[in-house]
Image (cartoon, rainbow, N blue to C red):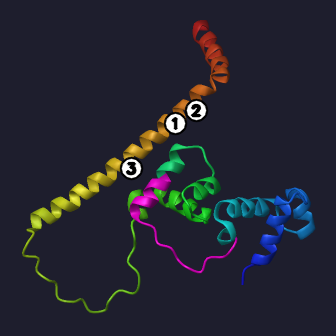
């Protein structure tokens, strides 16, 4: 059972929207954290009642969608919550998992995985008469190179953004440069 019922969530959201009180007031009144109330209000504004209901369906997302969301997160400065709302999801922890998996294992971590147990006995392999083995190997190699290229593009975009952010904070860097420059001249 969910910790907070749909009715309680809806009551808090409607109380907030009607001006009964702010996050802090409602937090004390209903004994729920301010952060949770803020998330529920945002989800309600974006998705309506469905944003407050607990989904019983496991949605599956394509590899391309997952990769797009990870790229968006790494190249912009939005929170997981904001990003989830903009792409039409109501599950920010799932985006967190995708980003962490991507950072650890690269794009392959976002590909769909086979479900179920392994078979004890292998079926006899079907002979692929249409495609020679050398082409199969080439296709796998090309796929591997494309994945590596994609990972490098994302890393490049991330580093460019990081560099841009560092350059925006130049007043602090100028102080350091001037002190290091004076040290260099003293030698």
Q: Is residue 43 visible?
A: yes
In percent of width and height, residue 132 lies at 8, 68
Q: Secondary structure at mark 1?
A: helix
Write down the residue under mark 3.
151
Do tag 3 and tag 1 residues touch (Cβ < 8 Å)?
no
In percent of width and height, residue 82 lies at 63, 53
Q: Residue at 56% across / 61% down in the picture?
A: 88
Q: Which mark is residue 125?
A: none
Q: Quadrant of the C terminus?
A: top right
Q: Nearer the viewer, residue 121 or 14?
A: 14
Q: Where, by quadrant of the figure, is residue 43 drawn?
A: bottom right
Vertical relation: 21 (above or below) 54: above
The residue stretch that appears in magenta: 52-70
How far apart are labels 3 and 1 at the CA level?
15 Å
Q: Is residue 113 left or right of residue 37?
A: left
From this viewpoint, which residue is outermost toward the front?
18
Answer few, some or many: residues within 10 Å of disc 2's Cα (few below 14, many 20 plus, some between 14 and 19). few
Write down the residue under mark 2.
165
In percent of width and height, residue 123 lies at 21, 89
How far apart are labels 2 and 1 at the CA level?
6 Å
Q: Which mark is residue 161?
A: 1
Q: Residue at 22% across / 57% down in the picture?
A: 141
């Amino acid at each position: 059972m969910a910790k907070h019922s749909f009715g309680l969530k809806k009551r808090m959201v409607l109380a907030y929207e009607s001006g009964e009180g702010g996050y802090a007031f409602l937090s004390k009144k209903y004994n729920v954290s301010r952060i949770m109330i803020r998330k529920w209000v945002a989800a309600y504004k974006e998705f309506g009642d469905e944003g407050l209901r607990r989904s019983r369906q496991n949605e599956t997302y394509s590899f391309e969608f997952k990769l797009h969301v990870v790229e968006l997160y790494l190249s912009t400065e939005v929170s997981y919550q904001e990003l989830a709302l903009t792409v039409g999801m109501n599950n920010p922890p799932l985006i967190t998992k995708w980003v962490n998996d991507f950072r650890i294992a690269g794009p392959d971590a976002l590909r769909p995985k086979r479900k179920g147990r392994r078979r004890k006995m292998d079926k006899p392999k079907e002979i692929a008469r249409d495609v020679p083995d050398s082409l199969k190997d080439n296709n796998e190699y090309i796929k591997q190179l494309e994945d590596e290229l994609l990972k490098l593009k994302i890393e490049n975009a991330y580093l460019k953004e990081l560099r841009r952010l560092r350059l925006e904070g130049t007043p602090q860097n100028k102080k350091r440069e001037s002190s290091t420059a004076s040290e260099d001249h003293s030698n």
